[in-house]
Amino acid sequence: MKDVKLRVARPTDRLDEVVRFYRDGLGFEVIASFDDHDGFDGRMLGYPGAPWHLEFTYHPGHKAGRAPTQDNLLVFYLPDHEAWKAAVERMHANGFTPVSSFNPYWDRRGVTFEDPDGYRVVLQNAAWDV
């Protein structure tokens, strides 16, 4: 399974707002998109060539709702302090305000932001050595 690629997909009621959060705030690129594909619109965000990306879909007439809890997280590990600081500053510059993490562990070395659907993203200033 070494060559596995990961797509994290979820619906949203706010496609344009969610794209803005992940594209402008986090600096991801829209690497693919579709409109009215069997009634769905979608955007894939990430980095070209990366083994992962995020997909957000919108289907008119279907209510996707908000995150079920405040502990639904995507955690991005940025071990370089300057890169981490730049990522946090980009979020602020795009109008996104940090929130306190449900689990205080993430506030010790990271900053948490909530996307328009209530899902949370942690920018963690640490290495992930697994």
Image: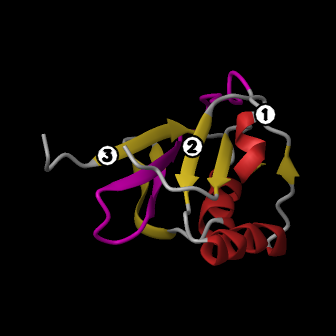
Residue 47 horizontal/vertical position (percent): 40, 69
Residue 52 sits inside the magenta stretch: yes
Q: Indicate which disc, 1 or 2, sits on the residue closer to the N terminus.
A: 2
Q: Measure how far apart labels 1 and 2 are at the Cα level.
A: 15 Å
Residue type at the position of mark 2:
Leu
Q: Which label lies toward us, 1 or 3?
A: 1
Instruction: State which quarter of the image contains the C terminus.
Output: top left
Q: Is residue 5 above or below residue 64?
A: below
Q: What segment carries the magenta color?
A: 42-69
* Side of 92 where 4 appears, left or right: left
For mark 2, give the secondary structure. Answer: strand
Q: Secondary structure at mark 3?
A: strand
Residue 46 percent location from the top left of the image: 44, 63
Contact between marks 1 and 3 (CB within 8 A): the answer is no
**Residue 104 got which mark?**
1
Q: Nearer the viewer, residue 58 or 96?
A: 96
The residue tagged 2 is 74
Is residue 56 highlighted in magenta?
A: yes
- Going by the numbered disc 1, the residue's amino acid type is Pro
- Can I make out residue 9 in this image? yes
Residue found at the very far top of the displayed protein: 68
- Quadrant housing residue 67: top right
Looking at the rendered structure, the kind of residue marked 3 is Leu
Residue 54, percent from left and from top: 45, 51
Q: Of the two numbered discs 2 and 3 on the same chain, state the one appearing first in sequence.
A: 3
Q: CA distance from mark 1 to mark 3?
A: 28 Å
Q: In which quarter of the view is residue 26 placed?
A: bottom right
Q: Quadrant of the N terminus?
A: top left
Instruction: Write the residue at 69% across / 67% down.
Output: 25
